[in-house]
Image: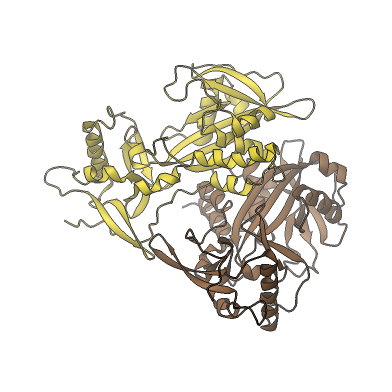
Chain colours: A brown, B yellow
Amino acid sequence: MDKELSLQKDLFSRIKELDGTRHAHLYVAFVVCGVCVGQVLQCYTDMLITCRINRENPTCFQLIDCKDDNCTTHVLAIINDKTTEDRNMLMNEATNILVRCGLIPKKHGELFSVSRGWCEDSLCVVDRNAAPFFGVTSVGVHLNCFVRTEHGNVEVWMARRASTKSKYPSKWDPTVAGGLPVGMGLFENVIKEAEEEAGIPNTMVTIGAKSAGVLSQMTCCSDGSCLKQSLYFIWDMEVDKDFIPHPADGEVDKFERWSVETLESEVRQGERLRPAMRLVATDFLIRHGVITPDREPQLVKIQSAMHQDRYIFPHKGAIDSGASEN
Amino acid sequence: MDKELSLQKDLFSRIKELDGTRHAHLYVAFVVCGVCVGQVLQCYTDMLITCRINRENPTCFQLIDCKDDNCTTHVLAIINDKTTEDRNMLMNEATNILVRCGLIPKKHGELFSVSRGWCEDSLCVVDRNAAPFFGVTSVGVHLNCFVRTEHGNVEVWMARRASTKSKYPSKWDPTVAGGLPVGMGLFENVIKEAEEEAGIPNTMVTIGAKSAGVLSQMTCCSDGSCLKQSLYFIWDMEVDKDFIPHPADGEVDKFERWSVETLESEVRQGERLRPAMRLVATDFLIRHGVITPDREPQLVKIQSAMHQDRYIFPHKGAIDSGASEN
């Protein structure tokens, strides 16, 4: 195998490195109102099934055997879930337990929605710090500002994260990257983040940024914890050759224009990108004709791995989650 | 639910209509050299397991119980597969049986490769007319020629298939659409088809067409037969406002420039497109910022459904396909 081919083969492995589904055997599906909304590490289930809204009420999480075709799997379900308010109180109590056990230092205060997936009905809420323990879907927006040079080549504005960031300091992101706050529209968030992070005027983004789809993958921490579906919503914006983004809110310490060759080299073999941004960069390179099927034999698998739907846990059986079993 | 939202919801259903995985229970995995290369309707397996290379040899297809986690599934495997030549002879004999049973009228003569997927090693060959019975991967190339109008709107050149075509006469395709002949490169095929079907000069395609990725879905005929992985390799080419493609080889009877609104209306509720081209058109509309996540709540599921990897059949267990069991 020649060197080029061996590097090409590697891209799929690098995309798969980010895929946490290999840790799925450590988890049980987390079911609310009969719907799989996430997953919980098996080692936490004993702790959670002691959880009750108050002393008068029975325990509310239950570990249930679930027959699916010929297989039996376990799911952790909220059984005593008569109302949304009950479920919210229960998730709050579960968060208290996570704090007491030292798994999270404290509550964050901001609440995340628990639902089957993006744009699905919210079934309850959970504190932001506890959300990863339940596999709650994570949503980010990403803007690639790019330039076409005189020779027709594409170059991309990349952002180096501030060295003071708690996660991935000094690693490189697309021009703009941000998490989605509750209650905000996706494009609205792109416009806001572009101004905050890169000083790009609202009107420029409103007119120039074009939605380019969504990437989805089941990601987790390197130790296998915090398995969740991550959604990366993508926008591209072609900008003038003389356009320069500038750090505005301190999240980014510098911007740099990269050739697509540099970007490709980074996704294939570099360590400068924030690891999850390999997906966003690879998608950009595929959509812009840089990574092509004639050069990349693994393209089908790579694109499939970047568009996973969340439901990796077999769970078709009906669970009567409305009735208490106690 | 307002009318717009109900139409939006419908797009996922229309993409899923093309997805044949709902028929998977009618099939068994087809395994060669221990690798799943396709699937065969269960009702054909009895016929195939009588198949042998010649009278002196034992039967070569075997129906095997395969333990996968706690589930038992059946796979049809070629057991007596010592050499590629043996396997080729066996697939040829299987094709003779399909002809004798009237399932195909005659051999085609052109041979298709049988492999785990696109760009994987070929394990044997099968006659083109028999390939669908074994779920052999189907590969097509697709070119979207598009124009940016003075107002910045995108319009796409669409091709109406000739009324004499045996499949989907008079339905609409992207500007250029063609199957991949054995031994030809993908982009090489785009260049060839663009000239043959639409009279577009080679140099124009070589310079202007940009690869934009691949779509993959398990498709089947409307009666549930011929389940296979279909790969749609996509190119976009921006063309001048005065560019007009013209029918060259009789495959297309006319070209027409459609607004993206017309194209979106077709994928959402029309019947003019060749059904599988809904995927290609939807992908174009997503990549070009027409179908956006703020307007399309099902976007994650839609993109996931358009990027399935082929292996829908549980098959992890090792099958010692090298040794005869007879």
Q: Position of residue B305 (x, y in %)?
A: 54, 46
Q: Position of residue B273 (x, y in %)?
A: 55, 27
- Which is nearer the eye, A114 or A172? A114
Task: Give the vertical position of A253 relative to A209 (above or below).
Answer: below
Q: Is residue A174 found left or right of A79 in the rendered image? A: right
Q: Is residue B233 found left or right of A167 in the rendered image? A: left
Q: Quadrant of the C terminus of chain A?
A: bottom right
Q: Residue B280 is drawn in which quadrant?
A: top right
Q: Residue at x 49, y 34 (%)?
A: B140
Q: Is residue A254 found left or right of A30 in the rendered image? A: right
Q: Residue at x 25, y 30 (%)?
A: B102
Q: Residue B41 is drawn in which quadrant?
A: top left
Task: Give the vertical position of A136 relative to A191 (above or below).
Answer: below
Task: Give the vertical position of A216 relative to B286 (above or below).
Answer: below
Q: Is residue B171 found left or right of B268 in the rendered image? A: left
- Which is nearer the eye, B231 or B63? B63
Q: Position of residue B73 (x, y in %)?
A: 33, 57
Q: Residue at x 87, y 52 (%)?
A: A199
Q: Position of residue A6 (x, y in %)?
A: 51, 54
Residue A242 seen by the camera: no
Q: Residue at x 58, y 42 (%)?
A: B12
Residue A13 seen by the camera: yes
- Which is nearer the eye, B53 or A86? A86
